């Protein structure tokens, strides 16, 4: 199939970027979206042009590296799908596809379609862990009874891959869904309760300091999240934050 | 104080002030409905009560503060949130993921504010500063103007849209257990929003034609 692509090109963090039009032929419907970009890059390289920089790693939908705002949606039109798992059969011959980087001041563009998502790492480092002494007499985790419902909810929260689609799609560039998943996965389990109050406060403090917007509960993050992280986690985050004030 | 500076605390404050204003709207609608049923006597009695009851007099400045806080904080949050994405998307398609009401709270809110100012000038100021002999006549008389009635109806449709997102959003901000209550909150919020828009508008339209 033939496609018209409009792709954001930006030489570096401080360079002025712009949308550039590309025509590409020979796209197969069973190619993934990133393979289509690989094909375009091969053609650009063979012409001596600079290839388009974009993030990718596992290409199996689990690492959280791929991003891209495709035709006005984070990770493109498919639900519960990362860009690497989006396939060209979703598009038609002759389609025009716009491809942009995640847009948020907290995610500055490094080059072309690659943005710096280390702000999410810094939020995680502020409290997205449990402090466990692993030397000596550790207790087997399975010895602690946990209600099935809590275990399931914690596991669902833990499936967040930190890709940043929630930030990219939120009209306020808020990172609440990401932070809430990281808070909830521990808040729901006994091991996480010990540091729960400090965790939620520290992570929110860093979230605000990194320049993310505030949550207005539009729910767009939940719809666009490739892992289906639920807004329930944001309600848990809010509750945890309020409870932390009275402790 | 660090608590109040966080984005989450500001949302909680928006939720609490919003729910406080919801209570006011409920009382206001109940009083307005007396215009139609039982009628003039009941309405005059309600106005008399609202004008003299000591508790209501204490609540009046609290209510004013509630409005001022909710409006100014709402404008501040919108402005602040907009500043978090300096470079906009060339192609953005937000309607696939979120409702129009949830994305346009600032505009539905500002339209209600515009109406609030008109309403205060038309009714509340004369009520407080002049000797109004007959409130029933003052209120129903305003609905003889087609322009006023139109603005009135549009303002309450706007408020209904505002509430359809605001009501459930407030509970989410307060951290209510979503799995248990979400559907109930959304349904009751939408029903409340619909009844507020319908109730106030119906009264205005009734007096325009009668």
Image (cartoon, rainbow, N blue to C red):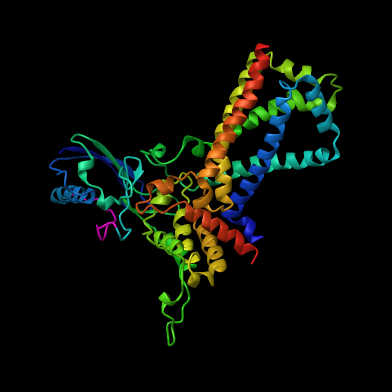
Q: Residue at x 40, y 59 (%)?
A: A156
In the picture shown, does residue B154 fall above or below A114?
A: above
Q: Is residue A13 left or right of residue A179?
A: left
User: Can you give x and y, in whole percent of width and height, for residue A208 in the image?
Assistant: 53, 57
Q: Residue furthest bottom?
A: A136
Front residue of B57/A50: it is: B57
Res. A238 image quadrant: bottom right
From the viewer's perspective, is residue A179 above or below residue B160? Answer: below
Q: Main secondary structure of the magenta part?
A: loop
- Against B110, is A44 above or below? below
In the rendered view, would you say A60 is above or below B143?
Answer: below
Residue B71 visible? The answer is yes
The span shown in magenta is A49-61
How far from the left and from the top, in percent, is residue B161?
Answer: 55, 33
Q: In which quarter of the view is residue A6 placed?
A: top left
Q: Residue at x 57, y 57 (%)?
A: A239
Residue B106 visible, this orientation: no
Residue B39: x, y in percent?
76, 20
Asked whether A157 or A82 is in front, the reply is: A157
Residue closer to the observer: B9 or A109: B9
């Amino acid at each position: 199939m033939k496609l018209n692509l409009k792709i954001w090109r930006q030489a570096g963090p401080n360079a002025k970027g712009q949308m550039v039009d590309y025509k590409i032929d020979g796209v197969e419907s069973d190619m993934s979206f990133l393979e289509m970009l690989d094909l375009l890059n091969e053609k650009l390289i063979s012409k001596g042009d600079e290839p388009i920089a974009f993030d990718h790693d596992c290409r199996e939908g689990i690492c959280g590296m791929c991003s891209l705002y495709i035709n006005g949606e984070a990770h493109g039109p498919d639900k519960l799908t990362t860009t690497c798992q989006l396939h060209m059969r979703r598009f038609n011959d002759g389609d025009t596809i716009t491809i942009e980087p995640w847009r948020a001041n907290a995610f500055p563009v490094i080059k072309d379609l690659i943005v710096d998502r280390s702000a999410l790492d810094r939020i995680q480092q502020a409290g997205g862990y449990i402090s466990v002494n692993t030397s000596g007499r550790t207790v087997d985790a399975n010895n602690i009874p946990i209600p099935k419902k809590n275990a399931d909810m914690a596991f669902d929260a833990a499936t967040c891959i930190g890709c940043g689609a929630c930030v990219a799609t939120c009209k306020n560039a808020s990172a609440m869904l990401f932070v809430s998943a990281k808070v909830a996965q521990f808040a729901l389990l006994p091991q996480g309760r010990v540091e729960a109050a400090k965790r939620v406060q520290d992570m929110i403090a860093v979230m605000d300091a990194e320049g993310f917007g505030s949550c207005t509960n539009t729910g767009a993050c939940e719809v666009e999240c490739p892992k289906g992280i639920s807004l329930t986690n944001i309600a848990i985050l809010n509750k945890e934050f309020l409870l932390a004030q009275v402790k | 104080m660090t608590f109040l500076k966080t984005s989450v605390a500001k949302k909680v404050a928006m939720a609490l002030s919003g729910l406080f204003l919801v209570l006011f709207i409920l009382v206001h609608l109940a009083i307005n409905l007396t215009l139609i049923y039982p009628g003039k006597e009941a309405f005059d009695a309600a106005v008399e009560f609202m004008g003299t009851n000591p508790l209501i007099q204490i609540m009046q400045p609290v209510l004013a503060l509630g409005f001022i806080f909710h409006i100014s904080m709402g404008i501040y949050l919108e402005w602040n949130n907009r500043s978090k994405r300096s470079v906009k998307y060339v192609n953005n398609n937000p309607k696939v993921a979120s409702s129009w009401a949830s994305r346009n709270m600032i505009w539905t809110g500002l339209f209600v504010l515009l109406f609030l100012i008109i309403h205060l000038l038309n009714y509340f100021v004369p009520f407080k500063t002049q000797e109004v002999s007959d409130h029933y006549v003052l209120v129903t008389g305003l609905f003889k103007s087609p322009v006023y009635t139109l603005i009135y109806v549009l303002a309450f449709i706007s408020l209904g849209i505002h509430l359809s997102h605001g009501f459930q959003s407030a509970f989410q901000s307060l951290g209510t257990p979503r799995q248990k209550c979400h559907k109930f909150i959304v349904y009751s919020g939408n029903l409340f929003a619909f009844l507020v828009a319908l109730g106030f508008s119906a009264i205005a339209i009734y007096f325009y034609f009668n």
